[in-house]
Every structure is written in structure tokens, then in C-alpha cells.
């Protein structure tokens, strides 16, 4: 089985106009979502916002 590709961005803003909606738009473009034929198909997109405290506790 081929490994899934994972694309990542964080919440940090480094310059004006680089908010989360803009970052997610760029992420979708990089992942090639616009090039997929999704007409009449169901698609799952997993978004994980993470919690640094849960990683520290071993969860």
C-alpha cells in the first residue's frame, strides 16, 4: 500500500495577510485538490489542530 502524503501548516502568522484561511488555501493548492475529479464523490479531509499538552502527557 502506498503511504499517504501529509501536508502541514501551523497557526503562526509571519507576515500581514497570511492568516489561516490563506494558509489553508495554499495548502489545498499544494496538495493538488483543485486537480482532482471529485464530482459526485465523497471525500474526507482530516484537519487536526493538535494540542501540545496532550503530546507531553503521552496521549
Image (cartoon, rainbow, N blue to C red):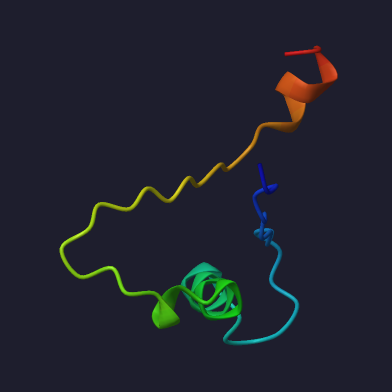
Residue nearest the observer in this picture, 41 or 49:
41
Q: Which quadrant does the C terminus fall into?
A: top right
Percent from the top left, x then y, of residue 45?
Answer: 43, 51
Above-or-below relation of 29 to 50: below
The residue under the point 15% across, 63% down is: 40
Residue nearest the observer in this picture, 44 or 39:
39
Percent from the top left, x then y, of residue 39?
Answer: 20, 70
Above-or-below relation of 9 to 58: below
Total labels: the figure holds 0
Residue 36 falls in image quadrant = bottom left
Q: Which quadrant does the N terminus fall into?
A: top right
Above-or-below relation of 28 to 54: below
Residue at the farthest left position: 40
The residue under the point 71% across, 64% down is: 12
Instruction: Give the left or right position of residue 58, taking residue 44 as reference.
Output: right
Percent from the top left, x then y, of residue 58?
Answer: 81, 12
Residue nearest the observer in this picture, 54 or 42:
42
Instruction: Give the left or right position of residue 57, taking residue 8 as reference.
Output: right
The residue under the point 70% across, 47% down is: 3
Percent from the top left, x then y, of residue 20?
Answer: 53, 68
The residue under the point 56% across, 42% down is: 48
Residue at the farthest bottom position: 16
Amino acid at each position: 500500500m502506498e503511504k499517504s502524503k501529509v501536508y502541514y501548516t501551523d497557526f503562526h502568522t509571519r507576515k500581514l495577510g497570511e492568516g489561516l484561511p490563506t494558509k489553508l488555501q495554499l495548502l489545498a493548492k499544494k496538495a493538488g485538490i483543485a486537480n482532482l475529479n471529485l464530482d459526485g464523490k465523497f471525500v474526507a479531509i482530516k484537519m487536526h489542530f493538535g494540542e501540545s499538552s496532550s503530546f507531553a502527557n503521552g496521549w
